[in-house]
Image: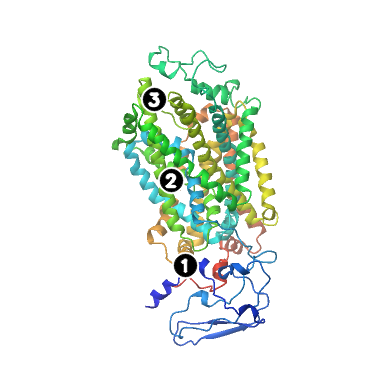
Amino acid sequence: MTRRVERRTCGAKIPWARLNLHKTRNDHNKPPTTTTTTTTSTSPTNPPTTDTSPTGDPKPDVTQCDPGKASTAPTPTAPALPPTTPPNSDPPPPYQLASKTACQKWTTGSSEPERDTWGKKVEFLLAVVGFAVDLGNVWRFPYICYQNGGGAFLVPYGIMLVLGGLPLFFMELALGQYHRNGCLTVWRRICPMLKGIGYAICIIDLYMAMYYNTILAWSVYYLVASFSSELPWTSCDNPWNTANCTLTADVRNATSNLTVSPAKEFFRNEVLEVDKSDGIGDIGRVKGSLALCLFSVFVLVYFSLWKGVKSTGKAVWVTALMPYVVLIILLVRGVTLPGATDGILYYLTPRFQMLHKPKVWVDAATQIFFSLGPGFGTLLALSSYNKFSNNCYRDALLTSSINCLTSFLAGFVIFSVLGYMANVQNKHISEVGEEGPGLVFTVYPEAIATMTGSVFWSIIFFLMLITLGLDSTFGGLEAMITGLCDEYPRLFGRHREIFVLALLLFIYVCALPTTTYGGMYIVDLLNNFGTGNPILFIVFVEATAVCWFYGAERFADDIERMLGSRPGRFWIVCWKYISPTFIFALFVCSFALGDGEMASSLPHWALALGWVITASSIVCIPLYIIYMFIVTPGTIRERIKTMIKPEEFVPPQLSQVNPNYGTHV
């Protein structure tokens, strides 16, 4: 019976946001008094004890806030509630042990500043879904699915989700929500010597912002070009077309193998003008129209981030929901096209003989990992604005499931159109499909150009791409902003709007080379060397830090304090053994099965630059370890002990009521 009652008073059963003590009408007229705190023991031999201390200037209790008093001067405290249970019974809920204090914001002089929270729970869910569901769900998953066994690919995909992706996804959401800080402060608390993880994450997010926003700028260029009576990539009569340009309807009758679609020439010769560049060694000048499109993307990003979760929470209602509306519209249109059934069958038909190939399993692990996005610091940042007792376990299951189902849905949208294109050109479906940007900037626009009402379909398609990408760039930049503002509140946190403006201007200037004639080569360089391998290494170190330095059992205790229930043995085993092994194997395979074709196409200096970009983030971790070893006093053994010992941290929501709350077993 004792255990049952204690569990009933934990976390989710009594939401912290609702633990407001009811004030009597006369409470505010009482003079200052001495606060008496009564502690009741569960032991029958220990009678209740009291501790009398002056109230002085008590630290406000964020869990006992009275909204009506939050902005007023300090209110005198009232005597504590008398004990309501006998000495040998269960301890009362922690909110009965706290004094009635009118809450204020923790500002100057407080050890913990008041933190913004999401206006509504759904805003957090939309932000996480928007970050996880990005362009890769549209241009990568459908391609690798049919390439690696069609419907059979869902078997390794599901296994990698359950054993690798989901545990890491849940881990980051729980870490951010418990510590309520960004990537720098969290890892300092988990393992002080591994604070370099936070700096490495910031550098990776910087690289991602430099090239990912450029891809969005390409979409903006297409969107603006779509507002015309006829799509510019419909014909071969434009100044950028070459003699090899062949209309889609004429491809089946073409005798030459050098035919190029007008959509492909529009992308390469008009949008990028890559034909004016001889490679990464000769990128040419900045293209003004692309630079303007990139600037418009940064303007949208700024006004979505400048106020923190207050502005981001409003933006995600559009950027997270619109892609689903457009996907459903495109799916309905796609399945009505001739040849769509062939494309969908090609997408789904299982080829189980492919499952014995290691590459299939590596592709499944890679896709699920980069789709969910642990390691970028975004999940830490977004969940840090949650209420302490929010059910992040349920959120992890819900948002990761939505992400995977969205990828699956996008496959129907893409392959219904690929089947249609194969029917029009009299080709096999494998001959018309492409992976990556080529799929959404050449193949799909080419198909749209042959449809009735092509202008409308083009507008909504590129609007979908823009909104898909904006959510992800919001997340990456918010991870960096939150991490720096939390770790350096006096330098950055006080004037967030100015800091965000300065940061985005800096990133915009750094991203201008990607808008040159050879900018596509820089985008490929940053994509392959800036984020891929480094993020795998960082997540491996993260999992090691949480499960072996901080302790998986201790981490499970933290989750129990928040949710009122302890994670099962499955999660602990995954965190300690399966997930680190999953990431390490993926990291090794990424080198063994790397893109040798790209490496061989780069000049030696560009390849060396790529490895410098890779090392620039990874090196933050060992450099900070060395720095901390130097500045930490004591013997070598004492230094190492100090460096790996987690900081003592009790969330304000617990420290203001009962420091032992949530630890009952």
Q: Secondary structure at mark 3?
A: helix
The residue carrying mark 2 is 403
Between marks 3 and 1, how big is the CA–CA gap?
55 Å
Return the mark for residue 421: 3
Q: Secondary structure at mark 2?
A: helix
233 to 23, vertically: above or below: above
Q: Earlier in the sequence, mark 2 or mark 3?
A: 2
- The quadrant in which residue 488 appears is bottom right
Amino acid identity at mark 2 = Asn
Between marks 1 and 2, how big is the CA–CA gap?
28 Å
Residue 525 visible from this viewpoint: no
153 to 245, vertically: above or below: below
In the rendered image, residue 206, in percent from the top left (x then y), is placed at 60, 43
Marks 2, 3: nearer the viewer:
3
Q: Residues within 10 Å of mark 3 (few under 14, many from 20)?
A: many
Amino acid identity at mark 1 = Gly
The residue carrying mark 1 is 11
- The quadrant in which residue 283 appears is top right
Given residues 195 and 294, the one toward you in this image is 294
